[in-house]
């Protein structure tokens, strides 16, 4: 077994353990919350005790907490998330479309901004003190520190109401009745609705990448190896590429971290644009104490973050030979 | 034919509030196939010259005037793109710090291939073949071209940069301090390699270094720079043998050498402030021979009759007289305290088979199986003793465990085996409850004077801090601080009290670091390479200071360094370490004149000589020190030892294998007794060794 395989195996084991911890925490915390999903039904007085017991039994909530926990773990392992109490629908049927909606908006936005802002940041760092550098820092910091709903509303006012270029709300026009994902997403109407939230998301994430990339390059700029590259006769842009390549690690870390967190959606953005994403759904589910739905959603989020971290570790090994294996090179 | 001709080069750096005149009207020329040396202390502008030649000046540096003519074209007038074509194709560069001048995330082979691809239109396969060839030329394993820089040691990385410089067979190679930061043995190997290759390729070399010994051995011509001015110029034989400039004399005298009985003489003072155009001679304020004329103008370079030698000094005609005077310390206003042999006091620190092993992390599975983890034996059974008023030098290559030994002695690391006694008490006594007392009595001075001082504290605070911590002389704190500062030569002390580290020069900072250690009146001082970052003249100052402290203050000092020459100057006794063990120990004079262990003699022979006429036989050690985790059985040095025989591989020789109390070594076949084992029996009673032929034998 090579050193790298061992390293990978170790990482995997840690990830599995982390997932277990995460789902257990979700399980306990939800049950520590006061009240139950049927509180509303009970207080309205429409149900008698017998009926309540029956419903509780139906959802398995009459069993001991340990039994529930074991069932819960078993279901997660087989990816059976159960029925949503709120919607009386299989959880996955509720979650899946919303998750897809969120991802289709945020993943391209994140990738776009990671590439564009990093390149811009590197260029700005290389030309330290230039007007471009100052302007880019100020504008991205501004975008980053303004709450996303303010930016979003501002964009809606300008582009949707005043200029009337794009629609303000929703993912498809109200009259559209698409069938299946392909029909939903591959259409001009979708693109029309997509542009504005996509732009806002790109801008929202841009600041972090830009600053990370800029700082990395600024730090590397005076280093000895760049001097040697320069002495070799590399052009300015080739040198910048090497400096950028050497400051990839923090960007990579941040990118994977963000990628994992995308699975919770960008709640404020989704609310402002009425985007049927997972963030909105989750807030609603927590409010209503829809155990199965929340558990499943949180499980998916935790899993996403953990997998993203695992990916970061593996990518590290690829991008930085010095960290590939527990440090220390083999001769 | 002249390859490179630099004419009246002037380079300035723009800083926030002033202009630094780093290089002031420097002229020199390099002929084809010639090795040219550029020597000077830090701040002399020698690296700036190199950067100007290569067009690598940082953004705030500008070439104000002057021409750099290379092969008939003026480099300063080239456009960015034209210059890129010249770089590497015609002028290659070996950078200063091998440790971080290679791109860490690019394989070494790719980095060399990149240089080839940038200038030549060749296929990948061809470039790779060339890289393999280059690796072979510089003595690296061609199968390692896909390794990354971190997989190579410092010396090997420097070989990679040399291979890179050779890639396109340039006409001129500029090497900027190529060996600084490497230890003597590696340095010697690298220089040997550069010379060997350069001879074969018939290119010119511009070698920039502060070690005039390196220049003396490798170069034909040289320029000595000071304060951005050429002080003296000419053929190495003339300039270094018969210097005509007081600065060269001072520089030469302060360069410590192993087989020299005279103490080196330091140049007092510090390098000039270059924030305005020099009007007087740049060396005037440190020069003992300065006259009124020197204060009026900087002297022009004067051709000395009938030889390739120029000097910039108003009193160049009196050179012979100055040279005689310059050898005397009194001339430089340094009190000659004589070589009064101080009485060594009682033993203050004694180690007995001291060990510091670091456990290696091991896989969980082997841990569960209860396998013994691997250990890095950084310090492995070291028995030494230090007396009061005695300086014990600890020497060895990097990675031999000498710094760990120092840290263990200071109880910064817990010993994992063995014992040591300090001031009559075992270390456990101090570790368990009396650490505060120990910390007051034992002080350690670290390598880097730039990092070891808190930049936000004034000298008063820095030096006073230990007093507060240990509640020592708190009622007369100010007096204690002033006294100590004066003791380390920072006079008048009041002037320094409110200064911050960044306002001090390197030498002054290291003195503050020493003062910080001395303010508590310690009994024992551990110095871990305190002078390695300092220029020669400052280094000698520090060595003399420590020597004086040992004599006057009755403290014991352990001086750890890889620089044998300075160890020879400061120490009474010397311990040579190799892979965690002391392999030779004894009085300095005896080790210098008659090294017994083959490792010691190779260390001694690796140090360069400042006299260009002296011939030195290189003893190049094969390979690198073995992996300290997986040591061979028997003598640890056997794999590299030229004299190793069967018995060396079987059992490890103990330190008292040969010799007596004052000089012992761990070797079965020590030098000087080799006749006994050699086939020709005629040398049995040989008492005079060829190695010691040119040293004065020391009476004992």
Image (cartoon, coloured by chain):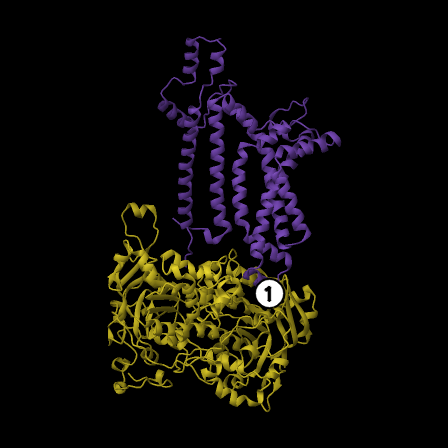
Q: In which quarter of the image is residue B679?
A: bottom left
- Residue B627 is situated, as x and y percent measured from the top left of the image, at 36, 61
- Along the viewing direction, whichever of A22 and B118 lies nearer the viewer: A22
Image-based side of A271 in relation to A12, left or right:
right
Residue B192 visible here: yes
User: Could you tell me how many numbered marks the image carries?
Assistant: 1
Which colour represents chain A? purple
Label 1 resides on the chain identified as A
- Residue B571 is situated, as x and y percent measured from the top left of the image, at 35, 74
Q: Residue furthest front?
A: B475
Q: In which quarter of the image is the N terminus of chain B?
A: bottom right
**Crowd band around label 1 with a 10 angstrom C-alpha radius: few (<14), some (14–19), many (20+):** many
Task: Identify the residue shown where x is 73% and y is 29%.
Answer: A161
Task: Identify the residue shown where x is 53% and y is 86%.
Answer: B238
To which residue does mark 1 refer? Answer: A231
Q: In which quarter of the image is the C terminus of chain B?
A: bottom left
Task: Identify the residue shown where x is 43% and y is 12%.
Answer: A52
């Amino acid at each position: 077994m090579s050193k790298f395989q061992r390293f990978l195996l170790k990482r995997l084991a840690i990830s599995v353990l982390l997932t277990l911890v995460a789902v257990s925490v979700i399980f306990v915390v939800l049950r520590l919350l006061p009240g139950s999903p049927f509180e509303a039904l009970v207080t309205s007085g429409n149900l008698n005790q017998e009926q309540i017991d029956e419903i509780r039994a139906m959802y398995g909530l009459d069993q001991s907490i340990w039994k529930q926990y074991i069932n819960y773990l078993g279901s997660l392992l087989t990816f059976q998330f159960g029925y949503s109490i709120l919607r009386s629908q299989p959880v996955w049927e509720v979650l899946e479309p919303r998750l897809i909606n969120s991802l289709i908006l945020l993943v391209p936005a994140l990738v776009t901004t990671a590439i564009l802002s990093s390149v811009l940041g590197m260029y700005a760092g290389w030309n330290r003190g230039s007007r471009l550098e100052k302007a880019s820092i100020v504008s991205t910091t501004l975008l980053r520190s303004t709450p996303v709903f303010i930016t979003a509303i501002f964009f809606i006012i300008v582009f949707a109401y005043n200029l009337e270029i794009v629609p303000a709300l929703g993912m498809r026009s109200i009259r559209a009745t698409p069938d299946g994902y392909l029909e939903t997403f591959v259409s001009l109407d979708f693109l029309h609705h997509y542009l504005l939230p996509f732009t806002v998301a790109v801008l929202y994430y841009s600041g972090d990448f830009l600053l990370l990339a800029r700082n990395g390059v600024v730090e590397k700029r005076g280093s000895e190896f760049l001097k040697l590259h320069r002495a070799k006769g590399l052009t300015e842009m080739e040198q910048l590429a090497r400096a950028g390549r050497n400051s990839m690690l923090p960007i990579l870390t941040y990118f994977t971290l963000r990628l994992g967190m995308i699975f919770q959606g960008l709640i404020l953005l989704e609310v402002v644009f009425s985007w049927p994403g997972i963030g909105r759904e989750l807030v609603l589910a927590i409010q209503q104490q829809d155990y199965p739905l929340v558990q499943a959603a949180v499980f998916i989020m935790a899993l996403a973050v953990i997998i993203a971290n695992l990916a970061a570790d593996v990518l590290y090994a690829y991008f930085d030979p010095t960290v590939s294996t527990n440090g220390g090179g083999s001769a | 034919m002249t390859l490179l001709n630099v004419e009246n080069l002037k380079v300035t750096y723009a800083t926030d509030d002033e202009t630094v005149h780093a290089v002031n009207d420097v002229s020199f020329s390099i002929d084809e196939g010639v090795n040219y040396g550029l020597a000077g202390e830090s701040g002399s502008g020698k690296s700036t010259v190199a950067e100007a030649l290569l067009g690598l000046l940082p953004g705030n540096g500008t070439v104000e005037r002057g021409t750099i003519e290379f092969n008939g074209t003026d480099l300063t007038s080239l456009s960015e793109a034209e210059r890129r074509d010249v770089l590497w194709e015609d002028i290659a560069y070996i950078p200063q710090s091998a440790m971080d001048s290679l791109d860490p995330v690019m394989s070494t082979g790719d980095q060399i291939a990149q240089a080839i691809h940038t200038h030549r239109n060749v296929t990948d396969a061809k470039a790779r073949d060339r890289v393999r060839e280059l690796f072979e030329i510089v003595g690296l394993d061609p199968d390692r071209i896909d390794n990354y820089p971190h997989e190579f040691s410092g010396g090997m990385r420097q070989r990679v940069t040399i291979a890179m410089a050779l890639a396109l067979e340039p006409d001129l190679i500029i090497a900027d301090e190529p060996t600084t930061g490497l230890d003597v043995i590696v340095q010697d190997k690298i220089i040997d390699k550069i010379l060997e290759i350069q001879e074969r390729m018939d290119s010119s070399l511009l070698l920039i270094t502060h070690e005039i010994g390196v220049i003396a051995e490798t170069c034909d011509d040289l320029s000595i720079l000071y304060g951005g001015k050429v002080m003296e110029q000419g053929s190495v034989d003339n300039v270094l043998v018969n210097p005509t400039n007081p600065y060269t004399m001072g520089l030469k005298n302060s360069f410590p050498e192993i087989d020299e009985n005279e103490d080196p003489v330091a140049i007092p003072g510090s390098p000039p402030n270059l924030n305005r155009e020099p009007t007087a001679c740049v060396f005037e304020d440190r020069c003992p021979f300065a006259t009124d004329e020197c204060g009026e103008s900087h002297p022009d370079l004067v051709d000395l009759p009938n030889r390739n030698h120029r000097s910039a000094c108003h009193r160049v005609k009196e050179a012979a007289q100055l040279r005689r005077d310059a050898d005397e310390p009194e001339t430089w206003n340094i009190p000659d305290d004589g070589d009064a042999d101080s009485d060594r006091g009682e033993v203050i620190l004694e180690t007995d088979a001291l060990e510091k092993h670091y456990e290696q992390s091991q896989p969980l599975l082997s841990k569960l199986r209860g396998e013994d983890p691997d250990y890095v034996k950084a310090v492995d059974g070291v028995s030494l003793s230090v007396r009061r008023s005695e300086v014990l030098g600890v020497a060895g290559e990097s990675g031999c465990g000498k710094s760990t030994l120092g840290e263990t002695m200071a109880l910064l690391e817990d010993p994992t085996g063995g014992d040591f006694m300090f001031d009559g008490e075992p270390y456990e006594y101090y570790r368990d409850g009396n650490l505060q007392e120990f910390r007051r009595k034992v002080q350690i001075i670290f390598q880097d004077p730039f990092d070891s001082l808190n930049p936000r504290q004034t000298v008063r605070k820095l030096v006073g801090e230990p007093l507060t911590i240990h509640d020592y002389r708190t009622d007369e704190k100010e007096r204690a601080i002033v006294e100590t500062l004066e003791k380390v030569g920072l006079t008048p002390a009041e002037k320094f009290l409110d200064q911050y580290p960044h306002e001090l020069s390197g030498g002054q900072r290291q003195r503050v670091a020493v003062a910080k250690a001395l303010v508590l009146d310690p009994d024992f001082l551990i110095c871990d390479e305190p002078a390695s970052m300092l220029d020669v003249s400052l280094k000698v100052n520090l060595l003399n200071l420590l020597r004086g402290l040992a004599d006057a203050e009755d403290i014991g000092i352990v001086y750890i360094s890889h620089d044998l020459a300075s160890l020879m100057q400061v120490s009474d006794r010397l311990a040579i370490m190799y892979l965690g063990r002391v392999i030779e120990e004894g009085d300095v004079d005896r080790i210098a004149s008659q090294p017994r262990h083959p490792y010691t003699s190779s260390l001694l022979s690796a140090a360069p000589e400042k006299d260009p006429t002296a011939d030195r036989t290189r003893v190049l050690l094969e390979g690198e020190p073995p992996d300290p985790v997986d040591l061979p059985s028997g003598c640890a040095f056997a794999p590299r030892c030229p004299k190793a025989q069967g018995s060396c591989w079987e059992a490890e020789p103990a330190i008292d294998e040969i010799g007596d109390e004052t000089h012992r070594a761990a070797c079965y076949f020590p030098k000087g007794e080799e006749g006994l084992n050699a086939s020709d029996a005629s040398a049995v009673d040989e008492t005079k060794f060829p190695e010691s032929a040119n040293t004065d034998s020391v009476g004992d």
